Image (cartoon, rainbow, N blue to C red):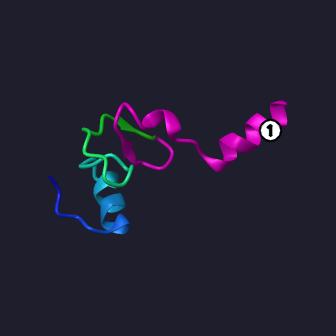
Amino acid sequence: MSHITGANEWRLDSMKGLLCTKFQCYNKPRNQCPKCSIYYCNEHITSHIHTDTLQDLQKEK
């Protein structure tokens, strides 16, 4: 288990591919977003979305 206590430290390690970006998720990160370079585990990648993606979805409606 990690000794990281803060969300900023967690995010930095996620950007290195060491952790899922979801704070206190200890699942192995397997997916990297090509847009923001943050890593996610298989469970949390589905919750990842970018603001411009939301705007595109709203335009389609």
Image vertical order of residue 10 relative to residue 6, above or below: above
Which of these two is toward me, 20 or 31? 20
Residue at horizontal 26%, vertical 39%? 27
Position of residue 47 measured from the top left corner of the image (x, y, whole percent): 51, 38
> Is residue 23 within the magenta segment?
no
Image vertical order of residue 33 relative to residue 13, above or below: above
Quarter of the rendering containing residue 57: top right
Q: Residues within 10 Å of mark 1 (few under 14, many from 20)?
A: few
Residue at horizontal 41%, vertical 48%? 37
Which of these two is toward me, 55 or 3? 3
Quarter of the rendering containing residue 42: top left
Position of residue 54 measured from the top left corner of the image (x, y, whole percent): 70, 42
In the figure, is residue 56 to the left or right of 19?
Answer: right
Residue at horizontal 37%, vertical 67%? 8
Residue at horizontal 28%, vertical 53%? 16
Residue type for callout 1: Gln
- Residue that numbered label 1 is attached to: 58
> Range of the magenta residues?
34-61
> Is residue 47 within the magenta segment?
yes
Quadrant containing the C terminus in the rendered view: top right
Q: How many marks?
A: 1
Position of residue 36 measured from the top left corner of the image (x, y, whole percent): 48, 50
In the figure, is residue 33 to the left or right of 58?
Answer: left
Q: Secondary structure at mark 1?
A: helix
Position of residue 32 measured from the top left corner of the image (x, y, whole percent): 38, 39
